[in-house]
Image (cartoon, helix red, strand yellow):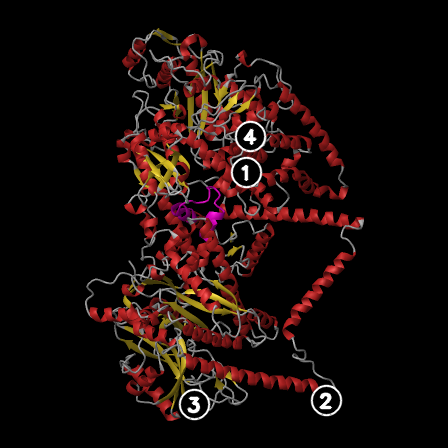
Amino acid sequence: MVPMPPSHPPIPQTINDFTILPLHIPPLPSFPRETTHYLYLRPNAPKLPTETTPRELFLVNVPVDATETHLRALFAEQLGGARVESVGFEGAQRTRGRGITGPVAVGTASGRGKKRKRGEMGEGEVGAEGREVGGLPEVYEREVRASGGTAVVAFVDRASAEMAVREVRRAVRSGRRVVWDAGVEGKVPALGLAGSRAEHALRYPDPAVLQQSVDDFMAAFSAQEAVRAKELARVRSVPDADGFVTVTRGARMVPAAREEDVEKVEESARKREKKKVGEDFYRFQVREKRKEEQLGLVRGFEEDQRRVEEMRRRRGKVRPE
Amino acid sequence: MAANGVKRRKLEHTSSDDGDVVSFASFGATEEEVAEPAGNAGQDKTLEAVDDGDERLGDEEEEGFGDHEGDEQDLERFANHSEEDRGDVEIDVRDGGRFPKGKPAEPGAEQQRQDRAEGTRVRKTASELGTYLAGTSRSNIFKLQVDELLEQIRPRRGKREEAAEKALHSLKKILDQMPARGPLSVSDAEQQFLISGKVIIPFAEPTPPKDAKYKFAFASPSSVNVVGSYALKTSPRSREAVEIDMMVNMPAALFEEKDYLNYRYFYKRAYYLACLAESILDKSTYDTRFVDLHDDQMKPVVVVSPRTPLDTEDEIKPTPRWRINIIPSVGAEVFSKDKITPGRNCIRTTGDTKAGPTPFYNSSLRANMLTPSYLKVLHHAASTCDGFRDACLLGSTWLRQRGYSARISEGGFGNFEWSTLIALLLQGGGSNGKPMLSEGYSSYQLFKATLQVLALRNLSKSALVVGNADTKPTGDGTPMLWDALRAHNVLYKVTPWAYAQLRQDARSSLAMLGDQLFDGFDAAFILRTDGPLLQNDYLVNIPVTTMPAHRGSYHKLFDALKRGLGDRVSLVTMKTAPSMSWQPGSLRSKSTPDTSISIGLIVNPETVNRTVDHGPPAEDKAEAASFRTFWGEKAELRRFKDGSITESLVWSTSEAGQTVLEQVVRFLLSRHVGRDAEQNASFVGNGFVRLLPQGTSTTAYQPLMEAYKQLETDIRGLEGMPLSVRHITPADPQLRYCSIRPPSDTGGRKRPSPANVVIQFEASTRWPDEVIAIQRTKIAFLLNISELLQEAKAAVTARVGLENQEDESLNQAYLDIIYESGAAFRMRIHHDREQILLERQLKDKSLAPSSREGTARALAAYKRDYIKLPAHTQAVARLCSRYPALSGTVRLLKKWFASHLLASHIAEEVIELIAVRAFVQPWLWQTPSSVQTGFLRALHWLARWDWRAEPLIVDLSGTGELRAADVQSIKTRFEAWRKLDPSLNRIVTFAASSLDQDGTTWTDGRPQRVVAGHMTALAKAACAEVQEKQVALEPASLFASPLRDYDFVLHLDPALRGGKKRAGATNGTTFKNLELAAEDDESMIGFDAAQLLLGKLEFSYGSAVVFFAGGRERPVIAGLWSPQTAPRNWKMNLAYSTIPRKVRSKEEEESVTAEINKDAILAEIARLGGDLVESIERDMP
């Protein structure tokens, strides 16, 4: 909203411990209006700090088209030149089918382009015991963020992070013009038609690559299965301290059919039970049944009355149109 | 005539001729008084029999009550009707639409039923509750609704009734004081009125000859009575006005024996009426007008209504609150009844000795003599049969909602005909002269039985005779209900066309009332058929001025159309112009030049466009000659391939501009009515078809269907696949004739959209036992198929694409298979183990809520994509071939949704269900036989669909596979959802079918409530437009949707949407063209940039903006800001871009609010869209 209509209340410079950084957005032919986006920043302070926390900056209300390149350029060129190591976005679209974490490292590394998920909200980092393998090829060249989302920017060192915060505050105080989307031309994949076409092309990866990723996945999967089976077998065969053997799945060879079988057996048992004494064998049964029916009728009738009442309430009187 | 009790009285045997008249003082008094002298002869036998029955019933009633034990007392009423209803249920089952069509009721059936009704225990108390049908819940609802309805429409005594009765008394006084006049000759009589100048005698055409020998005279009426439904309380309360018929009995002395001939009676009656009108004009301040009673020119009446303050000549003055029709009539004995039977000629022209019979004239005269007799008949019925009055109320409501009334222009079958039909059938009409209906019937049974008589008996072929007589129908298509005792055809003024339609309506209503699954109450009594466009497939309007003037011309037109159109149409109806009322001082108003008669055609979709008609073979001389006279020069003798030589007609194909139907109708008009009529006739009905690309025919789908078969054989023929194929099933609108554009229409580009197909392999134990691994295995399978297919078939391109990257429990990949012919398919693998694994996961109690949700979603997606979608596709495709108009209806309806930017919210399957509903539950009408009616009726239903309280349930099998228990469980599920989610956050519309009893498969999470409301509003607006414009409706106007209701609109580059390329774009035109050409590459199959953009927008702004898009139909995405984005206290995790603002509240506390940053969001959208978005418009005017 630039220029600001006078009636609007002023924009604060900070809110809670966030600094509010107005980003100027240049007009586009399809929307020829200069606008301002408000980015909220503060040093990162998660509930469970990690060793990288001191050199991180927490961003709220990241523009939906933000990329790592954008933020690198923003800090490097317009906010004092702090160098960004990496950026973790929250609420990003998933760009590819995930891989599997093998219990043992399996051959080729196709888990390329793995994004670092932000520790605070994203899924946990891949554990230390193995690497993710067999991920499907990426289908997005450029992710789109959810509006109002957050991001964590990690700088190369603590000093850079502090400098960045200082610089931002100074820019806000002095009212310096910080422009979004500047200095990234050609460095980020395009949006629009070209972007969509590229995206479409990415959906159809090279069959060989795809085959490879599936093979990797399945190899890791069967290795995992084997390990699990072994573990289960071990548990089954080794009594614990009290001398009991833990009951585990997989002892019998056809586990899949069991559940249904049990149901079937139960069903037939129930049927047999029913057949034993006819339902209208004793006089009291007949009488009870009749009573039941009558009660059912009463209930049905009352239910209907309620429904008609409801209908009347909803539509007013029952009158021909 | 001693004072008789209302009930159980034995009537004395009196002759109906004894001229007993109802005393005037009776109106407004109780019914007993009116009834008092209602003596009637000839029914003695039946009445006595019924009386006996009555007593018998009474006895049983007591016994019945004695049976019950004390503790069941309060249950008694329920138990009672469940027992009693057995008889009804049987009737019901039989009624349930299964009776053979067109076959008259078996003679025994009525008898049987009657026996049962009399013989079984029919208690009057039983009608208190639930007598209608079996004790199922639905019927109770039906019954409760009917009771409620009757309560509302039963006539009541209110202010306007009082005012009307006061007027009646004063009119009576005026009439009694009138001096006698005459006798005068024709010219003297006219002269007399000319001098006073107030009234012109309302003579019928032809006016009386000037040299007529007979004289006109006036004497004060021998009696004045209130007759008709007002006196009998059998007409429903209407909003418009209270209408009271006042019969003025002209003294017999005024008429001569031969006056029944040559309109003489009617001339004298007109004179008498003119006298009445003059004195009413003189002595009262009421508004007095002439009007033709029921459009019968021979019988004008005086209509008296309160004078409105703004007394203009306009017809559109505020409706008067009451109306009194003053009807001159004459005693039943004045003319011999034998002289005016329908078979006699009573209009004689000099020199013509062999003139045919004049049934209408005769019956019209006879009807004028019998008014009091029928009042007695009806009153007798009302007093002996408890359900009679209510049955009349139900019947007249039913008739009114379908547009029938006693006026000839509205069919000639009204309240009077309905109640007389019941009354007569209570007396006779069955086999051996026994009554067809029993007095023990409840009102609903009477109603239904009467409908049955209308539906099953073709009274224009064989007369229904009450009493002893051997009468044949007149042969001109007029139905014959012969009342032998009164020697009168009650249905004399029912037009053949209205009768055919009436029977059709009765049939569909019976089928509806027999439908055990769906409550037909609304369709029976609440909804109106709503105008000719919804009712007819085609309409032909002919200006009245171009038609020959005489009455027979309509009949001739009707006969010509019926014969000429033959099996092309299933129904021909006509709507003639109604007559208008006129001031007594002016001449009878001629119809204005712009009035027209409207012919409605309901076509037979299979035969309507046949181009060659085979007539009779040449050897059959008589038939051939008649064929030649009928068709004139159009008839050709042709020899056909099978060697037969027949008279035939050849029409040009529809592509010639006019449909075959139109050609035939125009030919018939010019040959049998006149060139003038043909030239001025306008044809309405094909307009909507033109909106569909490549028309409504399913032939445009044939190439894809064939390619699909090819695909199936190709896949099954592949060698070296690890598992053999069990099924390949289609799962796409294009493979069920339901895509807006047929698959061959790709906007001039070689870029078809791939049709989804599901493949299932034979079971194997080698699949992994985990969902994610299964998805990967599927990719391996697809890669394998792709490789084998490309090896085996050179003309096929296949490649594997990825999807659902955000959730690995969902299907991860598909195989696009593209044939050189241009057909494209997208294949996914169905593996049934997935379901078991997912269900097992759901049962796992230790699952975290978020992953449980994900699993549930995956399970729903599995069921939708692999089970329901293929089943739905097959069912809808089958229905499309059964109902030829369905495919076009679905496509038109989808286009409507897309044009109103609802395409992204309402699933295609739901739209299909809505359209199918109009075909399998067509009640109120018959199954639509054209795209136009199908579409309009679907909209009509949509406008009324109260999705908050009603689930949409459709039987997709079309063969009644949906059972009552299924419907019940669907409803229960619906109610459970409403209880679970009363604010409609997740499930707004609920759409279930015989294949999908969950009801949420297509509607989970979409549409949102605001969208559903928008949809209803749009449908209502469309229906209002149809209602207002009627025949002048411009079809495209229903598809135009203004954009000003949205907060902002993104105008997309039209070239992207497969629309027309922009002419003369300003810059980079050539570049753009190249780019577009590149898109026609095969690798771009399935590419939809706008859809991708919409997906991104919904991902980013899903909770802050509701987006509306029209798919390929409209290159626009519109948005509405969600009300949740109102300014609020600032917090970190808002799901939209915000502007922080300092706000100082009253307590001087400073706080910061967050306001949605609309401009920044739009700028972001502009960046996201890049060159896809041409412009963004906001702050709509």
4 vs 2, front mark: 2
Question: Where B350 sits versus B702, above or below?
Answer: above
Disc 4 chain ID = B
Q: Secondary structure at mark 1?
A: loop
Looking at numbered disc 4 in the image, what kind of residue is underneath it?
A: Arg
Q: Which residue is mark 1?
A: B100
Q: Main secondary structure of the magenta part?
A: helix
Q: Give percent across and percent down for residue B723.
A: 53, 72
Looking at numbered disc 3 in the image, what kind of residue is underneath it?
A: Pro
Disc 1 chain ID = B
**Residue drawn at 60 percent across, 71 percent down:** B840
Q: Quadrant of the N terminus of chain B?
A: top right
Ranked by sequence position, the earlier of labels 4 and 1 is: 1
Q: Quadrant of the C terminus of chain B?
A: bottom left
3 vs 2, front mark: 2
How far apart marks 4 and 2 lie (CA) works out to: 89 Å
Decide which of B511, B759 is in the foreground and name it: B759
Region rendered in magenta:
B914-938
Q: Which residue is mark 3?
A: A54
Q: Which residue is mark 2?
A: A241
Q: Which residue is mark 4?
A: B389
Q: Are marks 1 and 3 on the same chain?
A: no
